[in-house]
Amino acid sequence: MFTSPYPDVEIPELSIYDYLFDEVAGADLDRVAIVDGATGASMTYRSLIEQINRVAGALANRGVGPGTVVGLLCPNIPAFASVFHGILRSGATVTTINSLYTPADVANQLTDSGATWLITISPLLASAEPAAETVGLDAEHLIVIDGVPGHPSLADLLGEGADAPAVTFDPATHVAVLPYSSGTTGRPKGVMLSHRNLVANVEQARGLLTVVAEDRLLALLPFFHIYGMTVLLNLAFKQRARLVTMAKFELPEFLRIIQDHACSYVFIAPPIAVALAKHPLVASYDLSSVHTILSGAAPLDAALSDAVGTRLGCRMLQGYGMTEASPVTHLIPQNAFELPAGSVGFTIPNVVCRLISTETDAEIAVPTEGVSEPGELLVHGPNVMLGYLNNDEATHETIDSEGFLHTGDIATVSSEGVVRIVDRSKELIKYKGYQIAPAELEALLLTHPLIADAAVIGVLDDDGQEIPKAFVVIVAGAVLTGEDVMAYVEERVSPHKKVRRVEFIEVIPKSSSGKILRKDLRVRVAV
């Protein structure tokens, strides 16, 4: 077992609302809390807290409270913060829904979570209305933030001027949010995260990230995903910093918002790092305000990390976690200048880790020097979920009898406690008894100057042997053959790790949080 090199922190026994907003006072009330990156419209902490309490009061007047689940289908806009925390302040549970979901996807999550209300915006009504109809929600139970005829709006809720209700619950057991995750495998499951889980993870991470009130954080990563929810929506507010929202990624707008709003702290997923390292448009914008970029949601290669940091003249950090851990378990601290790029840094305070063999389940010891053998990473701490909603079997498969969360990710740990994620255990390619990590080959492919993006999966050859296949996106205007790609890799890896098939595609399918959707690539292979 191994723990954080940093001392444990005290976890307040508070609701997430009380933890974030109870002590906002004085000059902090008039600080800008959140800005719409597209329009520049802003809201102070004073206005945000007032809106949160009025939303909570209006919802309570409609019978919303402890035991109620409210679906929230909304992109990153300032109103998300008012509604999200208003629901939590009412004592209800929020199930945050992916803005890219189809009506069927939305309906499935509403049904599985037991949601009896849905809050959205008018551009997403094409998904929200059919889903609401499918699960039997009437027009009054479908709230449209920006207002459409026949449905309550955010203005309606705020206009009632209702006081927030008096609610009491145990922060350690009361479910605050129900994001959905596939875990290590399978269909999405509702992840029960308590108020204590959310409070704990902010408290565990904030001392390492050292966000300060003067920082301006670009909020591109979706708030509906636990990464954006914790490190942006919650941690930024705890530090009294300024959030600058961005509803969807478009590179020119992303760069403009950083420039025009002087963003200093930028949170990204690896695909955006590829653009920052390679795209010529980056040179057309003044990004000098950025002092730190933190990448998460998927592995970031050391060479790519260094390329971004060098090009922008900023500090590149990486973190690791999963929805089931609220999500952060490992971070490169803001002031840890000697940690190797490509690692995910140290275990955060209050977390205990294990590495176990994927073959024997035997525990892998932390070495006295050098780096350990790779093994599945297990984590235990106050940020680990209560379990999967209505799915005891999946819960017991993921959290063992000692309370350790089995991440399904393969990692190593150094004698200094530095952790590196090797790959997903379910995604390892086994070629003639050798294990090949797709992330390693993907990182290598991205060093090719004519490759804009890449993904690798295991496929079967004519003899039924699993081999690595690369899906490659070529830089616009470039010419590259499959033989060129395979030769490039062959010159740089051990013989068993060679890419043996190549397919050129226009875009690598990824989730909204930046993870490669390997299942979509496998479907292409099967067709």
Image (cartoon, helix red, strand yellow):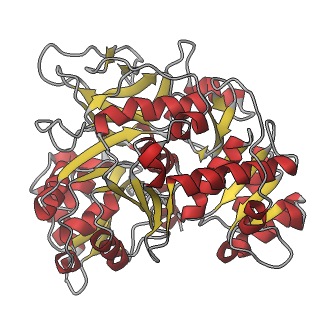
Residue at 35 percent of width and 72 percent of height: 257
Q: Is residue 104 left or right of residue 298?
A: right
**Image quadrant in which the C terminus is located:** bottom right
Residue at 23 percent of width and 23 percent of height: 417
Give the camera-side residue of 401 and 494: 401
Give the camera-side residue of 109 and 475: 109
Give how far across and how far down residue 286 sits, in percent.
Answer: 19, 73
Give how far across and how far down residue 319 sits, in percent.
Answer: 33, 41
Residue at 48 percent of width and 22 percent of height: 11
Residue 247 appears anywhere in the view:
yes
Quarter-of-image position of residue 387: top right
Give how far across and how far down residue 29 sits, in percent.
Answer: 48, 50
Q: Residue furthest front?
A: 26
Using the image, determine if residue 311 lies above or below residue 171.
below
Using the image, determine if residue 344 lies above or below residue 306.
above
Q: How many marks?
A: 0
Residue 434 appears anywhere in the view:
no
Using the image, determine if residue 397 lies above or below residue 518.
above
Give how far across and how far down residue 448 sits, in percent.
Answer: 15, 66
**Image quadrant in which the N terminus is located:** top left
Residue at 77 percent of width and 61 percent of height: 157
Quarter-of-image position of residue 125: bottom right
Q: Is residue 227 left or right of residue 157?
A: left
Q: Is residue 32 left or right of residue 312?
A: right
Give the camera-side residue of 173 and 9: 9
